[in-house]
């Protein structure tokens, strides 16, 4: 049973091949959506916009986001932890640059979820990719 729950917000970006941008943070092995924890008093949308700017060097506006969904699932890189995630979809074309704690960027095909050298966060496999397929 999980001992803690992290409140996070993330943004799902697609490229022209319909792949999803994923990031790997320093000291971790799983790839996930760009985003992170909310600061005190910060709502999920503001947190997502701030995190995308910090992690990718990209400025996205509120009007560029559409709510994809909110889910609670197993955290990828922390034991005995759940994530309560609010995920937004953006149609903005970006040129991301790994910044802050991001050490690697990869575009993931949402129909391929089992590449051992490219492990994806459970939230992506269990919730985000199915939501994108249904949209």
Image (tube, helix red, strand yellow):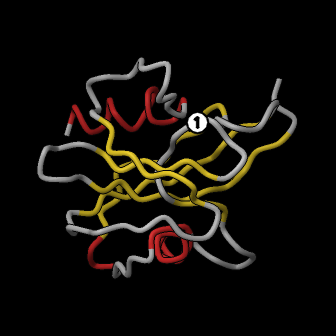
Is 72 positioned to the left or the right of 45 in the image? right
Task: Give the image quarter of residue 88.
Answer: bottom left
Residue closer to the observer: 36 or 104 = 104
Q: Residue at x 35, y 54 (%)?
A: 12
Q: Residues within 10 Å of mark 1 (few under 14, many from 20)?
A: some
Q: Which quadrant, please, contains the C terminus? A: top left
Residue closer to the observer: 18 or 104 = 104
Q: How many marks?
A: 1
Secondary structure of the residue carrying numbered label 1: loop
The image position of residue 81, as x and y in percent, is 77, 36
Is 109 positioned to the left or the right of 1 in the image? left
The image position of residue 16, as x and y in percent, is 12, 52
Q: Which quadrant, please, contains the N terminus? A: top right
Q: Residue at x 34, y 82 (%)?
A: 61
Q: Residue at x 54, y 29 (%)?
A: 122
| Vertical placement of residue 47 versus 111, above or below | below
Is 20 positioned to the left or the right of 87 in the image? left
Per the image, the residue denoted by label 1 is 30
Q: Residue at x 56, y 72 (%)?
A: 47
Is 80 positioned to the left or the right of 89 in the image? right
Give the residue at the far right of this rendering: 3
| Vertical placement of residue 129 versus 101, above or below | above
């Amino acid at each position: 049973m999980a001992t803690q729950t992290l409140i996070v917000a993330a943004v799902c970006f697609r490229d022209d091949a319909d792949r999803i941008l994923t990031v790997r943070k320093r000291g971790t092995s799983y790839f996930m959506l760009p985003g992170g924890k909310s600061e005190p008093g910060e709502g999920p949308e503001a947190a997502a916009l701030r995190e995308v700017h910090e992690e990718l060097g990209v400025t996205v506006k509120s009007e560029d986001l559409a709510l994809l969904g909110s889910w609670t699932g197993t955290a990828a890189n922390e034991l005995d932890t759940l994530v309560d995630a609010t995920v937004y979809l953006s149609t903005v074309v970006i040129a991301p640059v790994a910044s802050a704690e991001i050490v690697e960027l990869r575009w993931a095909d949402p129909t391929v979820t089992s590449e051992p050298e490219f492990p994806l966060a459970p939230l992506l496999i269990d919730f985000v990719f199915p939501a994108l397929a249904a949209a």
